[in-house]
Each structure stands twice: as structure tokens, then as C-alpha cells.
């Protein structure tokens, strides 16, 4: 039987406060630790040990600004409104790696929350709606670490988080393999999990209206959306892809 889902401030799930990345002058670039820039956030949402630019850090900066496996990275600002708040998860690091000043690092406490589950939440329609509530638009769109920490997230007990993350992660692994095969064969390599975690929306009523609005979608669809992956019989196919029903 599924455990009870609860809402909690994102900051209470973290092992330490959120932190903005580092800024270093040009003379310090080209050597030293790898550095995650905005390009990696968007090109590699499940970040692995990929080629990156480098930056030299002092010992104190290395202590404060290094990344660990399981860290969540959020785009702090973006010229495109939808890009602010973009979430990526660090899956693998093969050498010291830091992150630039336009990125916010959040380090989940593994005894309270599963990093991969949170990554999928923040890339789901309800999670994107949450991020939209803290997005500020001035010259560029942006979010702040303090606002991010206050966001209410809805999540199940830790074992269920891990089970959900494992299923979605396994699907993403398979989709990535298929994408590579399609690229090699000249296909488009579109991924179904992108539809699963981003394309979910309430099914329309017969009169054409939405079944519920954004606020209700946040409260009602997160459990149904993610829990549906435990039981494929509770899901329905749309255009060859799958998303979970909210009821």
C-alpha cells in the first residue's frame, strides 16, 4: 500500500543551505577543476562526466563550491523566461567539478529525500508550475535561492521516492540508448520520458475545459502522476507515450 504523501518546504529536505555558484575572472579560466556552465544544464539534464571548461579555484573555494553526486542544479537566470529554474541532477563526477555563478546548487539530505525523485518532480508539470511561482522577470528571468528553499514540494515516504526514481531513471537510461541508436541511424531520437515528466496535463472535460487549474494540478496530480508509474495498469497511452492518470 502506498505511503502518505506530504508537503514540505524544499529547504527542509536539504543537507545544507542552497548556494549560488562561483564567479572567477578570465585569467583563472582554462585550467583547474571542471566547471558546469549553463550550457551543461540544458544539454545534460542528467549530468554525467562530460567534457567541460575549467577554472582555477583556491582551497577555500574548493571546499565551498565543489559538486557531489546527487546535487541538484537550478538555472538562476535565463534570457528565456522558461529557462530560469531549469533543474539538472548530478549523476556522475569523475574529477573535481564546480559550478558557475548563474547556477544554484541544492544538496538533498539522502535520509530525507531522493535526489532523482526531486529532479523528476521539478521537471514535471506540477514542479514546473511551482518554479513558475517564484520566477521573476526584470531584464532577464530569474529565481533566487531563498525563494527556491521556501517552495512546497509534495513527496511520498523515502522508499517510495526511490522506487519511483528507479523506474523513471531506468526509462531514461533506455531512452538515451535508443536516442543514440537513432542518432547513429539518422533518426530524431525523441524521448518518451520527456513527455512523461514534462508533457503531463489534466485530461480535458468533454466540454473542452480543464479538469482542474494549476494550483489544483499541483496538489492533485503529483501523487497520481508519479504513483502511476508503480502500476502501468493505472496509466493510459497518448500518441505512443505514457502518462499517469491523476485520479
Image (tube, grey):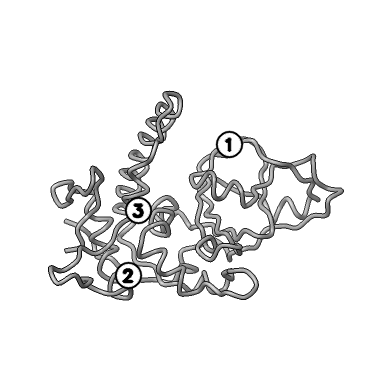
Picture residue at 63% right of the left edge, 63% below the top: 19
- Circle 1: element type: loop
Of the numbered discs in the image, which one, if any, rests on residue 49? 1
* Residue that extends furthest to the top in the rendered view of this protein: 185
Give the x, y percent position of residue 14.
Answer: 50, 62
Task: Give whichever of discs 1 and 2 has the lower sequence position.
Answer: 1
Quadrant of the image occupied by residue 146: bottom right
Give the x, y percent position of residue 143.
Answer: 57, 69
Mark closer to the observer (3, 1): 3
Label 1 packing within 10 angstroms: few (<14), some (14-19), many (20+) = some
Label 3 packing within 10 angstroms: few (<14), some (14-19), many (20+) = many
- Residue beneath label 2, please? 218
Q: In this orientation, which residue lies closer to the viewer: 217 or 71? A: 217
Give the x, y percent position of residue 159.
Answer: 31, 52
Label 2 packing within 10 angstroms: few (<14), some (14-19), many (20+) = many
Q: Is residue 68 above or below residue 48?
A: below
Label 1 to label 2: alpha-carbon separation? 33 Å
- Residue beneath label 3, please? 197
Q: In this orientation, which residue lies closer to the viewer: 191 or 134? A: 191
Picture residue at 45% right of the left edge, 74% below the top: 133
- Circle 3: element type: helix
Amino acid at each position: 500500500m502506498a505511503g502518505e504523501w506530504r508537503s514540505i518546504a524544499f529547504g527542509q529536505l536539504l543537507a545544507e543551505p542552497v548556494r549560488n555558484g562561483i564567479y572567477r575572472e578570465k585569467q583563472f579560466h582554462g585550467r583547474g577543476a571542471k566547471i558546469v556552465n549553463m550550457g551543461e544544464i540544458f544539454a545534460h539534464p542528467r549530468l554525467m562526466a562530460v567534457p567541460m571548461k575549467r577554472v582555477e579555484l583556491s582551497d577555500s573555494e574548493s571546499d565551498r563550491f565543489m559538486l557531489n553526486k546527487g546535487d541538484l542544479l537550478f538555472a538562476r537566470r535565463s534570457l528565456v523566461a522558461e529557462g530560469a529554474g531549469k533543474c539538472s541532477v548530478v549523476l556522475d563526477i569523475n574529477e573535481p567539478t564546480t559550478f558557475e555563478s548563474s547556477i544554484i546548487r541544492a544538496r538533498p539530505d539522502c535520509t530525507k529525500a531522493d535526489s532523482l525523485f526531486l529532479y523528476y518532480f521539478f521537471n514535471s508539470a506540477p514542479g514546473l508550475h511551482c518554479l513558475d511561482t517564484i520566477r521573476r522577470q526584470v531584464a532577464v528571468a530569474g529565481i533566487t535561492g531563498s525563494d527556491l528553499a521556501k517552495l512546497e514540494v509534495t513527496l511520498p515516504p523515502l522508499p517510495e521516492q526511490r522506487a519511483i526514481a528507479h523506474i523513471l531513471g531506468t526509462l531514461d537510461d533506455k531512452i538515451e540508448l535508443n536516442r543514440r541508436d537513432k542518432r547513429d541511424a539518422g533518426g530524431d531520437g525523441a524521448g518518451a520520458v520527456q513527455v512523461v515528466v514534462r508533457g503531463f496535463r489534466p485530461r480535458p472535460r468533454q466540454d473542452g475545459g480543464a479538469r482542474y487549474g494549476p494550483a489544483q494540478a499541483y496538489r492533485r496530480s503529483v501523487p497520481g502522476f508519479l504513483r502511476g508509474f508503480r502500476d502501468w495498469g493505472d496509466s493510459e497511452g497518448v500518441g505512443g507515450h505514457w502518462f499517469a492518470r491523476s485520479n
